[in-house]
Image (cartoon, coloured by chain):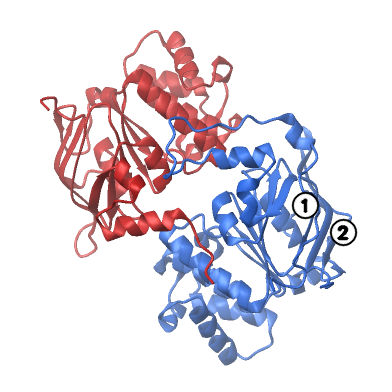
Amino acid sequence: MTKPPMLSIHDLNVWFGDPPDRVDAVKHASIAVAEGASFGLVGESGSGKSTILRAVAGLIDSWSGNLEVAGRTIHGARRDRQFFKTVQMVFQDPYASLHPRHSVDAVLSETLRLQGIGDVDRRINRLLDDVGLGRSFRFRYPHQLSGGQRQRVAIARALAAEPRLLLLDEPTSALDVSVQAEILNLLSDLRAEHGLTYLMVTHDLAVVGHMCDRIAVMQHGRLVEELQVEDLRRGAAQADYTRGLIAASGSYRAGG
Amino acid sequence: MTDAPLLSVRNLRVTFPTRQGLFQAVRGINFDLGRERLGVVGESGSGKSMTGRSVLGLIRPPGRVEADRMEFQGQSILNLPERRMRKIRGQRISMVMQDPKFSLNPVMTVGRQITEAYRLHRRVSRADAHAKALEMLRAVQIRDPERVMDSYPHEVSGGMGQRIMIAMMLAPDPEILIADEPTSALDVSVRNEVLSIMDNLVRDRGMGLIFISHDLNMVAQFCDRVLIMYAGRIVETLPARELHKARHPYTQGLLASLPRLDAPQDRLPVLTRQDSWRDGDPIAPHADTDLPGGLR
């Protein structure tokens, strides 16, 4: 391959605090996500999977290593406009990630203005159509929306900048299963339509199995294993930890 | 066996006044609980938590609880005065909530919380309560109970916190345990451990368990019988091991919308909600339990 990957993470370390209380949240992590791919990061709470996303997005400044997005190296926690036109993030809890006193219109038009995109009126309508909400939702406030509708607004906000890479941090774990199905379908459709690249973090193996082609498993801040989704489905994991995770998510079996 | 069920509920309704009029969170449900593990499944807003809370008298005004019958071992517990409810709540019917971070007191050691809770219900000396707390922590498979007794809630993990809650709730030997999403704040690997601990304790003591959850598959494997709630009503009741044979379109839709590792598909089937589900006839509506006296 001659084309650089959409996202390349090399020897990433992320830490919080100073010695002696320093916590190393991510240790020597390296992954590459090809353009148009959907890459899943799996692990339990505290494994560092969300921390990787946050470091890429510029929400954490205490990191070292090499981060490249679409061939451009990024530094520190400052990100320029070019970066945000390429990368956007969708957060876990749509109840927390939308400003309670900003209408859908305000949320989307602010993003469009920040990106220097004109023709706001038409764009907002199109974004709302894209995420399956429709124009009637434009002047609603978050409290007038259900959890699934809020997550659709958050996705519309991320799409407003016409990014190429979406960072998805547990986008459905705060939602009911039937709503989760709707949002996952929406994300699949959007990826196909817009040729997006996904880096998705989740603790749910069935969800990554459905959404991603390639999966990295994390434990205690380290990447334990990287595998193709087919291997995950066949249960052909190399690392004991991955096998344990697959068995545990298989579900609870009543003993005796 | 002809024992009375532990808990018998007929036509339970929970209403809250809102600006748009009365909102009915639970709309006339019937069920009995024997010495069994009864799963209550539904999405957010289906009324499953309200059902659990109403049994414990935890619906505060202006919310209202009405029922034709709500009996605990033949004795009515509907809208009992708070003073009498307190003799039942915690001691004979207790509850484990979702997130131990919010249900444990952050400024009190674990040991003090368990002993204090225990002494509220049983007249025992401090030393006996301390011994009981240690015994309970061992029962929930905490390896180092002495150390855990002296720690504060923020010093223990989520799974450990939930085990502490279970220890605290089971110390007075209640007859019914209501567990409201007890594992949804936990990681998968820890979740199974906590479930099996709860399972063993409930079986050993011959308790009745009401297990409230949104996770159909987990409930199917953990419970004996499942009630499926939709919009404040029970739409289907069935033995847990026959969940895959569910007949109600809502239950079937919920099951189908889960992504599965072993059966990949391009698009997930999406629920199309029908108005008829709100008021249609429930499937297998018989409320009484086949297991009034115990599992075997």
User: Would you identify the image quadrant in which residue B249 lies?
Assistant: top right
Residue B69: image tag: 2
Q: Would residue A65 be found to the left or right of residue A43 on screen?
A: left
Front-most of B114 and B237?
B237
Q: In which quarter of the image is the C terminus of chain B?
A: bottom right
What colour is chain A? red
Q: Would residue A244 be found to the left or right of residue B19 on screen?
A: left
Residue at the image position 67 percent from the left and 75 percent from the top: B206
**Residue A30: horizontal and vertical position, in percent?**
17, 44
**Residue A22: horizontal and vertical position, in percent?**
22, 60
Residue at the image position 43 percent from the left and 24 percent from the top: A156
Front-most of B111 and B175?
B175
Q: Would residue B173 be found to the left or right of residue A98 on screen?
A: right
Residue at the image position 69 percent from the left and 75 percent from the top: B174
Classify mark 2: residues with Cα within 10 Å, few (<14), some (14-19) or many (20+): some
What colour is chain B? blue
For disc 1, the marked residue is B61
Q: Is residue B289 above or below residue A143?
A: below
Decide if residue A15 is in sight here.
Answer: no
Q: Earlier in the sequence, mark 2 or mark 1?
A: 1
Q: Callout 1, which amino acid?
A: Pro
Q: Callout 2, which amino acid?
A: Arg
- Chain letter of mark 2 equals B
**Residue B163: horizontal and vertical position, in percent?**
50, 70
* Element type where label 2 sits in the image: strand
Decide if residue B36 is in sight here.
Answer: yes
**Residue B39: horizontal and vertical position, in percent?**
65, 57
Q: Would residue B238 be found to the left or right of residue B107 on screen?
A: right
Q: Quadrant of the N terminus of chain B?
A: bottom right
Residue at the image position 77 percent from the left and 62 percent from the top: B289
Q: How far apart are marks 2 and 1 (CA)?
A: 20 Å
